[in-house]
Amino acid sequence: MKRLLTLLLLLAVALPASAQKEKVVERSAKKAPAWLGISCPDYFTVSATAPTLDQAQKQCLTDIRQHIITSIASNITSEEKLYQEQTARNGVVSLLNSYASEVGTTGASMPYLCDISLSRALGVYWERRFVKQEKSYYYIYHVQYPFTDADRSAAIAAFRALDNEHLERLEQLEEQFETFTDLSFLDQTAAALNPLIDYFFDTDRRNRAVNLQQRCRQACGEVAIVPDSASLGCYCYHLALHGRRVTSDRQPRLESDYATNLRVVPLDGGYALLYDEAGIEGEENFITMTYTFGGRRLQHRVVFDPTEGKLAVRPFGTVEIDALGPGADSVATWRISVPLRSNNDTRFEVRHVDIRVPEFGAAAQGSLAGYAFEGKGVHTLRFTASVPQVTPARRSVLLNGTLRIVGADGRQTDVRFNLPYRLNFTNR
């Protein structure tokens, strides 16, 4: 009995002593407000302690932000849970943490997160306390902050809108990947996917974005050069990816010990490699063409036979066209000059010509008589043709055509060519 009385006396002495360990030395109001530690549908409260008043205020602002983030995330998670009935509890918690993290990341553009300030608080109360045992001071800061159900719904809607924007962008890029024709899409899309990969916090969408980026990078190494036609001085080709014709504004690197004046120009959705041959008989004469897409090299060798030019007369250089008209019948007159190079001393004639200009969708053709030339060297074929007046349909720097050459022995040869041209309009 005496021991019990002694214990009670000790407790009676200890409790007042414990209560006196901290002392309020300063406060913002004479009496603590009734809302301390209470939350309701229209507001919530947060409290923070820190060595200085400024630090306690900043911590409260951080806690307010986190409270709103968690509120938004928990509401979204509760909706997601309806679709994930078999998700384990730790999976739901993980989803909540992911949403909370992402709400915080995207919160810079959400009004309920970027406008947080003490000026919006419904109430503020603080105390400065002295800890006798440690002989130190600290502040405790309390904030009553408004956040109604309407505010919560608006914040959730803002987050979902941002989330949907990212998802729609991913779906757009996935769809465009199947139909694009410009190879610049690959580099641009791989770069555009980086912020989406950083944003997506769920495994499914993140994996989709990562997979699409990998497909873009892989596709850079799967581009092919497909030959279309070839003649001495001109090699026509196009680029293809997975069987689909594609284009690129990148110029390939051209190298050759057997050709000069190397250049690539656009032609009918493809390209033409033009060159002046300087080949050596008995050797493999070639041009190396190298593209680089997304760090991947695409190399192609163009082989040509320099003896091809010695077996026939062939057009070369630039075709000059003077367009006159049109007349009353909407037909224009074209005066056409085609440079020819002959590699032998014999006589030859040009009996038929067919020249097509893709840019105008026009053709100049017809039989010729009396167009005879003789001797090795350069000659010029000049003739006039009537062409329906048309407006340019597409940009092209090359025309294509066929000349029928008749040699001194009567043998006929059709010479096909692709050459640059210059079109001069008069009296338009």
Image: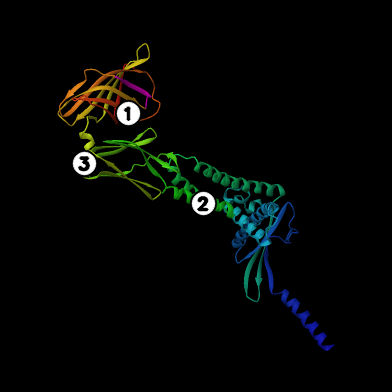
The CA distance from mark 2 to mark 3 is 47 Å
What residue is shown with label 2? 211
Placement of the C terminus among the 4 image quadrants: top left
Placement of the N terminus among the 4 image quadrants: bottom right
Q: Residues within 10 Å of mark 2 (few under 14, many from 20)?
A: few
Residue 118 position, x and y percent, is 64, 54
The CA distance from mark 2 to mark 1 is 43 Å
Q: Earlier in the sequence, mark 3 or mark 1?
A: 3
Q: Earlier in the sequence, mark 2 or mark 1?
A: 2
Q: Quadrant of residue 171?
A: top right
Q: Which residues are magenta?
A: 359-366
Q: Which is nearer the eye, 108 or 181?
A: 181
Q: Residues within 10 Å of mark 3 (few under 14, many from 20)?
A: some
Q: Amino acid at mark 1?
A: Leu
Q: Amino acid at mark 2?
A: Asn
The CA distance from mark 3 to mark 1 is 25 Å
What residue is shown with label 1? 399
Q: Earlier in the sequence, mark 2 or mark 3?
A: 2
